[in-house]
Amino acid sequence: MKKLSFFIIYSFLLLSAHSNELNVITTYPYIASIVENIGGDKVQVTALASAKWDPHTILPKPSYIAQLRKADLLIINGAQLEIGWLPQLIRQANNPKIHFESTGFLDLSKFVNLIDVPKNISRASGDVHPEGNPHYYMDYMNLYQIAEAIKNKLTELNPENQRYFTENLNKFKEKLNGKIQNWEAKIKNLYGIKVIEYHKIFDYFIKRAGLVLAGTIEPLPGIPPSSKHIEAMEKLIMMENIKFILQDVYNPDDAANYLSKKHNIKMLKLPHDVGAVDGAKDIFSLFDFIIERLNND
Ligand SMILES: [Zn+2]
C-alpha cells in the first residue's frame, strides 16, 4: 500500500512537473538550439524544419499542425523567411496562444538589423528576400540580442523561472564571449578574401569575417542561374581573384561544381543551420565548423 501510494504521488509529481514545462516550437533548428541553452529543463523544444532543407520552402507536414496545436510558444526567424510555408500551418493549427499578435508568438527578426533592405518591398521579380536578407543569425554577434529576446519571452510566459532563465542567459553569453574570441583570432586570416556564394545565405557571416562577396550564382535570391548568368560569373572569375565558392547543403551544386572545376576554385559546402552537416551540432559548433573549413582549405 505504501509502495502504491508512493508510486501514485511520484507519477503525479512527474506529470505536474512535465505540465509546468513550456512547450516551445521553433521553425528552424538554430532557434531550438538557443532555446535549449536558455530554457534548460523548464522547456520542451522542437524545431519544425530540418536543416537539410531549403529554409524558404519547407514542405508542410500534417504533424507540424499537431505540434503547433500543442504549443505554448512559437518562435520564428521572421523577415519573411517562413512566409511561404508557415502562415497556413498556423491557421490550420488554430491555437490562439501562438497567433501573430499573441503573447506566445515571437519573431526574432524584430531584434536585429537586417542588411540589403530594399527601398520598395516587392517580390515581383521573384526575389525571396523582399524585406531584406533574413539570414541574420549567420552573424554571431546577433546571437546576443536573439538569446536576450528568447529569455525575455520565456520569462514573460513563465515568470516563476525568471532567475533560472537569467542565469542560463548569462552562461550563454559567457560561452559566446569565449567562442567569439576564438573565432575572431581565426577569421583574422580571412580578411579581404574574395568569395562567391550560391544563395545570399552567408552574407552576414561574410560581412562579419571581412570576406568580400564578389558575386552570387543565383542572379536574384531564389532564382536559379541561367546560362547567361553563369557566363557573366565566368567573366567575373577571370577578372577577380576568387578563393572560395560557398555552397549551401540544399541547393543544387552543379553550377558551383562546374565553376569550381573549370576555374580551379575550391567549393566549400557550408552549413547554414544546426544539423545541416554532422559537425554543426549546436549554435556554437555551427560557427566552429564554418570557420575551420575556411581556415583549413
Ligand atoms: Zn534566403
Image (cartoon, rainbow, N blue to C red):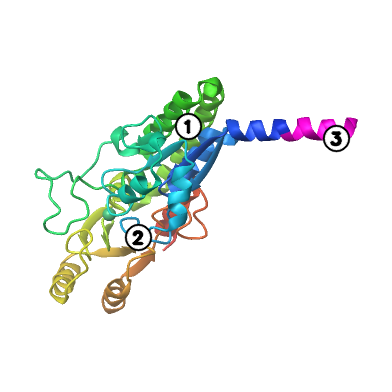
Measured as percent of width and height from the top left, residue 67 is found at 48, 47
> Is the residue under label 2 in contact with that under label 1 (CB below 8 Å)?
no
Residue at 65%, 31% in the rendered image? 16
Measured as percent of width and height from the top left, residue 65 is found at 43, 50
Q: Main secondary structure of the magenta part?
A: helix
Is any part of residue 272 visible from this angle? yes
Question: Which of marks 1 and 3 precedes in the sequence?
Answer: 3
Please name the residue that numbered disc 3 is placed on. Answer: 4
CA gap, disc 1 and disc 2? 29 Å
Is any part of residue 287 visible from this angle? no
- Residue 107 vs residue 176: left or right? left
Q: Check if residue 257 falls in the magenta segment.
A: no
Q: Check if residue 6 falls in the magenta segment.
A: yes
Which segment is the magenta one?
1-11
Measured as percent of width and height from the top left, residue 75 is found at 40, 40
The crowding category of the residue bearing disc 3, from other C-alpha atoms within 10 Å (few below 14, some 14 to 19, many at least 20), is: few
Q: Is residue 1 above or below residue 284?
A: above
